[in-house]
């Protein structure tokens, strides 16, 4: 299966979002209707767009005020390549392909087994296998935390929410915290246990 183009969005070195690029246009800017909304005053309302066809993605700056930079160069148009670093305002966006670039990385990522076990609440006893780069925790449409996976490392990060997020009875810092197998996670009134083999 062909690897799927994706974007990893970072703010202050912390991953805040990871999305698979749809075929066709993905608009970027401050407007809420955009496919990728960046809440930052240095980002234009309509800042840029990424057009994807097959495995190829092309970025176009939409005459933004502060510009779009790829690999430290200001660009108007750019054919994106795996590993390109896009800077828009305070956000850093890494372009890549979801499938591993080589067989060893692929076998390493598939050999790691990780899951969350729900300990309390209506879904008590349920097992959630962690197979995607990002897993949202909390209520549907209003996630309180996200679990990001890079290789065999899992990081728990709170989202903008009124829910308290704890790891082993301690609040999770805004920048996130790496998880170890056996860690207890509390999101609102739900308790979960992280397991990794």
Image: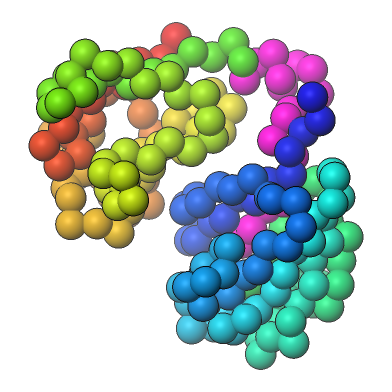
- List x then y, in percent, for residue 134: 48, 38
Q: Is residue 132 left or right of residue 183?
A: right
Residue at 74% across, 28% down: 100
Residue 120 vs 178, above or below: the answer is: above
Quarter of the image where one finds residue 71? bottom right
Q: Is residue 146 magenta?
A: no
Vertical order, 119 against 28 (above or below): above
Residue 125 or residue 106, whichever sits in front: 125
Residue 136 at what x, y percent from top left?
Answer: 38, 40
Q: Is residue 138 visible?
A: yes
Residue drawn at point x = 84 percent, y = 44 percent: 55
Using the image as rendered, state which of residue 123 and residue 178 is in the foreground: 123
Percent of width and height locating residue 19 = 59, 48
Horizontal relation, residue 195 to residue 47: left or right = left
Farthest residue in the bottom direction?
65
* 89 sits left or right of 162 in the view: right
Looking at the rendered image, the quarter that the N terminus falls into is: top right
Image quadrant occupied by the C terminus: top left
Q: Is residue 166 left or right of residue 87?
A: left
Magenta span of residues: 92-109
Residue 194 coordinates in the image, percent (x, y): 31, 21
Q: Is residue 58 above or below residue 77?
A: above
Between 156 and 79, the residue placed more toward the observer is 79
Q: Quadrant of residue 189?
A: top left
What residue sits 64% from the left and 58% below the top? 93
Judge whether residue 84 can be spotted in this image.
no
């Amino acid at each position: 299966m062909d690897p799927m183009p994706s974007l990893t969005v970072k703010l202050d070195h912390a991953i805040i979002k990871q999305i698979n690029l749809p075929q066709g246009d993905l608009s970027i800017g401050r407007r809420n209707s955009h496919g990728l909304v960046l809440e930052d005053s240095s980002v234009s309302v309509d800042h840029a767009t990424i057009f994807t066809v097959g495995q190829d993605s092309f970025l176009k700056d939409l005459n933004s005020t502060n510009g779009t930079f790829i690999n430290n160069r200001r660009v108007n148009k750019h054919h994106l390549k795996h590993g390109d670093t896009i800077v828009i305002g305070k956000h850093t966006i890494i372009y890549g392909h979801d499938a591993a670039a080589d067989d060893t990385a692929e076998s390493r990522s598939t050999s790691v087994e990780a899951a969350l076990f729900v300990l309390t609440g209506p879904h008590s006893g349920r097992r959630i296998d962690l197979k995607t780069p990002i897993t949202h925790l909390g209520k549907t449409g209003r996630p309180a935390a996200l679990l990001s996976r890079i290789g065999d490392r899992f990081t728990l990060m709170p989202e903008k929410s009124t829910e308290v997020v704890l790891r082993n009875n301690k609040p999770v810092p805004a920048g996130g915290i790496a998880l170890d197998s056996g860690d207890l996670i509390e999101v609102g009134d739900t308790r979960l246990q992280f397991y990794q083999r």
